[in-house]
Amino acid sequence: MRNFPFKILVVALLLSTCQTIPVKVPIVKTKEPVEIKNSTSLATIKFDRIGFKIKRGTAIESYEPDLLGLSCVLVDGNIFWNQGRVLARNIEFEDIFFDEMKVANFNVIGDPDKMFANASDKKKKSNFLIGGKIDEIKLEVCEQINWWTGFPRGTKKGKGAIKVRWQVFSVLNIKVVFETTTQGAAKLEMGVGGGEMVLIHNAFGNGVVNLTPSKKFVDLLTAPNQTIVDIKNVENTELAIDRYPPRQQKTTNTIDQTRLSVVSIDAEYSHGSGFFIAPDLIMTNFHVVGNGQFIRLTLLTGRKI
């Protein structure tokens, strides 16, 4: 048994030359996407994260030597998933998602060709975040050899398929609003270095393509988005702070105190204003802070917090 490096999210796999466990790659049909004439009529989407939920020790690949041994190494065996559950952000998967969704004319943001896309597109917020969790990987590969020397060439060809469970997260409602599962498949007729990763990436792209025909998914993006909350019944709403009576003095008499309560807000790629409504509470607009982790406040005095 020997170690086999697998360049994905610090995942390590093991290759066994013991008895081979059959890994059957399913046949996956590529579906036709829903026709979208105007991408701007849809809500904006952005790929956020990729996950792998495969049981440790699961055989995800089998080696398929040819009978004559003229093009493939005469060795059988498996590659086993040896990482357990993984959840991370990955630029390569994000790029694949963007490219396939753009071809299908979805309103997807996060252009990989823009090195500063997040900053330059700061006015274009994502309404929905998309996550994909790979539940299954099936690969059949051939490790190619040099005909003259008989030594491995370091290239692999074959076929593979994956199963992806998708979740759509509403930024406004702060919850998952849609889930579905697709399959994707890929084939390498010519051997390449890192053939397994190429197969997984290409199969993932095909899985993205098979998400685009989902009418429920398109309907979700087509539905009008709620932009304001109902504040008509504010008297019946429980407040997080004590209620204060309205000021009885003229505005001109309290202008200095009012000005001191106003702050400027910088939240990663957006900025705006807010004001203190309590010693430890500031009110601002959601589109200013969004889901940013780090918020910088600038007080009237110039102090930054």
Image (cartoon, rainbow, N blue to C red):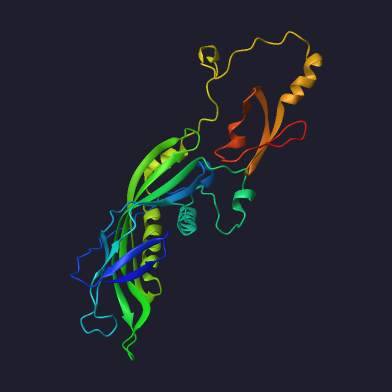
- In the rendered image of this protein, does residue 156 appear above or below residue 53? below
Would you identify the image quadrant in which residue 204 lies?
bottom left
Residue sticking out furthest to the left? 19
Apparent side of residue 95 relative to residue 150 in the rendered image (left or right): right
- x, y percent for residue 134: 35, 53
- In the rendered image of this protein, does residue 268 appear above or below residue 69? above
- x, y percent for residue 7: 42, 65
From the viewer's side, name the closer residue of 106 and 250.
Answer: 250
Apparent side of residue 273 relative to residue 50 in the rendered image (left or right): right
- In the rendered image of this protein, does residue 57 appear above or below residue 40? below
Question: Taking the image as drawn, is residue 161 in sight?
Answer: yes
Q: What quarter of the picture does the C terminus occupy?
A: top right
Q: What quarter of the picture does the N terminus occupy?
A: bottom left
Apparent side of residue 282 relative to residue 46 in the rendered image (left or right): right
Residue at 29%, 59% (x, y): give it.
28
Would you identify the image quadrant in which residue 199 lies?
bottom left
Residue sticking out furthest to the right? 252
- x, y percent for residue 23: 23, 64
- Count of numbered tags: 0
Residue at 62%, 25% (x, y): give it.
280
